[in-house]
Amino acid sequence: MTDTFKQLERAALGTRTPLDEVLEAVRFNDDGLIPAIAQQHDSGEVLMMAWMNREALAETLATGRVCYWSRSRGKLWRKGESSGQQQHLRGACLDCDGDTLLLQVEQTGPACHTGRRSCFYLALENGEARITSEPLIDPEALYRKPAEGR
C-alpha cells in the first residue's frame, strides 16, 4: 500500500487531498487496470463490474460519462456506445487500499449485455444456480444497429 493511502487511513473526517496525488497512488494491476464496480446511485443496486485503466478513469472523472477499458477489444469502452444504455457518474470512491473503485451511477436501462438490469442475475444457492431476473430488453434488439437513413 502506498504512503498516500496509509496517511489517508488516519486522516480526520473532511480532510481534503489533491485528486492528482490520490490518482498517482492508485494501485493498478500488472495490466494497468483497476476493477470498477457500478452501483445505481439511488437504490444501491450493484449493476456490474468492469475494468478501468488510468485513461478511462480520467475520462470518466472529467466528463461524467462512465468509460471503461474493454479487455476483449483492447480499447476504451464508453458504456452505452453500442447499446445506448449509458452510465452517468454521480459519485466515485476508492477503497482503503486504492485498488478498487466504486462508481455510483445513473444507469439508463439495462446495464448487462444480456438485456438485464444487473449483470448479477445468477444466484448460487443450495447446490444450484438460479436465474433471478428476466431481460428488460431482448439482447438482439439491444445491439441491433438502426437501419441507415433512420
Image: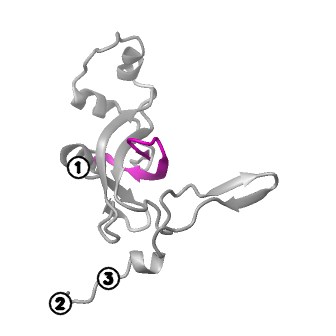
Q: Nearer the viewer, residue 77 or 85?
A: 85
Q: Nearer the viewer, residue 89 or 136?
A: 136
Left or right, residue 98 beside residue 81: right
Distance Cα–Cα, label 2 vs label 1: 31 Å
Looking at the rendered structure, the secondary structure element under dot 3 is loop
Disc 2 vs disc 1: Cβ atoms closer than 8 Å?
no
Q: Quadrant of the N terminus?
A: top left
Residue 53 image point, x, y percent:
34, 49
Left or right, residue 131 beside residue 1: right
Residue 2 image point, x, y percent:
40, 24
Disc 3 vs disc 2: Cβ atoms closer than 8 Å?
no
Looking at the rendered structure, the secondary structure element under dot 1 is helix
Give whichever of discs 1 and 3 has the lower sequence position: 1
Check disc 3 and give the amino acid type. Lys
Q: Which residue is mark 2?
A: 149
Q: Quadrant of the C terminus?
A: bottom left
Main secondary-structure element of the magenta-colored stretch = strand
Q: Which residue is mark 1?
A: 59
The vertical placement of 48 against 116, above or below, is: above
| Membership of 45 in magenta stretch | yes
Range of residues picked out in magenta: 37-54
Q: Which residue is mark 3?
A: 145
Distance Cα–Cα, label 3 vs label 2: 12 Å
The vertical placement of 43 against 81, above or below, is: above
| Membership of 40 in magenta stretch | yes
Disc 1 vs disc 3: Cβ atoms closer than 8 Å?
no
Residue 131 image point, x, y percent:
66, 62
Task: Residue at 42% x, 52% y: name it.
Answer: 51
